[in-house]
């Protein structure tokens, strides 16, 4: 663990997750007057490119809370860690993010009545039942075919593509480590703090809680001067759906 100070900021950098070492180092810094310093400074926890699961993230928060040390911002380049941080209400320091919020049309709402034709199983004949569950995440290690529905109360991690005509529906978050071409509905039916992340996309339907995001993919590609959009994060913000394209940060 390394501690450095910039103007108005205290940056605590962690290179590896070893709870005893983190706890001991924080105690050492506190003995040297860290608490007095952070009173008038923003605390940034720099996790580098560490990819944390939810349990590891919660452990770090618990350690900092035990010392009554606030974490104002998380600095990290790993998309899954970023997603978890935002889900816990901690902003992510991402100066390389391109905000394309003005290309989204969030006024459309979702009809979450299961008897309706919108998002209902009647349109998706093959409902996938997965039993490979971790504590907080359902992991699905295949492509999801057109006409299939993958649904869970937990965060869903798809290691594969979501094909056009397929739907992934989660009461929490959705992560697609592949191409999202179908429908992703996070926060079903009314959890507006949920997040959708995908490595790639092509004309998907994005839903979070009772909102639908519609965007002009070709216009965004022109804006980025790129043939393909990658590393995309969707989340609700002030009654709209925000889209962020996450680029690798350079030191």
Image: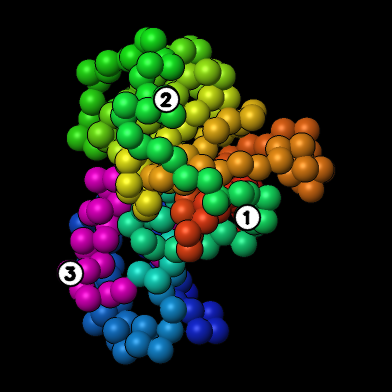
Residue at the disc numbered 3: 66
Comes first in the chain, label 3 or label 2: 3
Residue at x 52% of width, y 62% of height: 93
In the rendered image, the residue lying farthest to the left is: 66
Residue at the disc numbered 1: 101
Q: Nearer the viewer, residue 55 or 173?
A: 173
**Dot 3, crowdedness within 10 Å: few (<14), some or many (≥20)?**
few
Q: Which quadrant does the C terminus fall into?
A: bottom right
Residue at x 52% of width, y 56% of height: 240
Evaluate if marks 1 and 2 touch, with contact meaning CB atoms under 8 Å apart.
no
Q: Is residue 208 left or right of residue 95?
A: left
Q: Secondary structure at mark 1?
A: helix
Q: Position of residue 37 (x, y in %)?
A: 37, 87
Spatial separation of the CA atoms under disc 1 and disc 2: 28 Å
Q: Position of residue 89 (x, y in %)?
A: 36, 61
Evaluate if marks 3 and 2 touch, with contact meaning CB atoms under 8 Å apart.
no
Residue at x 36% of width, y 37% of height: 112
Residue 3 in view in this figure: no
Q: Which callout, 1 or 2, points to the residue nearer the camera?
A: 2
Evaluate if marks 1 and 3 touch, with contact meaning CB atoms under 8 Å apart.
no
Residue at the disc numbered 2: 117
Comes first in the chain, label 1 or label 2: 1
Residue 144, relative to residue 80: is it above or below?
Answer: above
Q: Which quadrant does the N terminus fall into?
A: bottom left
Range of magenta residues:
45-70
């Amino acid at each position: 663990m390394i501690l450095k100070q910039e103007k108005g900021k205290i940056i605590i950098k962690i290179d590896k997750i070893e709870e005893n070492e983190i706890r001991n180092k924080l105690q050492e810094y506190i003995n040297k007057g860290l608490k007095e310093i952070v009173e008038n400074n923003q605390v940034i926890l720099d996790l580098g490119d560490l990819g944390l699961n939810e349990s590891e993230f919660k452990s770090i928060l618990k350690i900092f809370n035990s010392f009554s040390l606030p974490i104002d911002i998380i600095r990290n380049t790993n998309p899954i860690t970023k997603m978890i941080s935002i889900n816990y209400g901690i902003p992510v320091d991402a100066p390389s993010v391109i905000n394309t919020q003005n290309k989204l049309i969030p006024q459309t709402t979702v009809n979450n009545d299961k008897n309706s034709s919108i998002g209902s199983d009647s349109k998706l004949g093959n409902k996938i039942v997965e039993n490979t569950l971790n504590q907080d995440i359902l992991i699905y290690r295949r492509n999801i075919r057109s006409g299939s529905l993958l649904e869970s109360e937990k965060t869903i991690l798809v290691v594969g593509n979501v094909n056009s005509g397929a739907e992934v529906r989660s009461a929490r978050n959705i992560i697609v480590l592949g191409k999202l071409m179908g429908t992703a509905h996070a926060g079903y039916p009314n959890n507006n703090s949920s997040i959708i992340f995908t490595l790639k996309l092509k004309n998907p339907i994005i839903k979070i809680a009772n909102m639908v995001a519609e965007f002009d993919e070709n216009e965004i590609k022109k804006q980025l001067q790129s043939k393909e959009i990658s590393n995309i994060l969707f989340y609700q913000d002030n009654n709209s759906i925000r889209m962020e394209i996450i680029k690798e940060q350079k030191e």
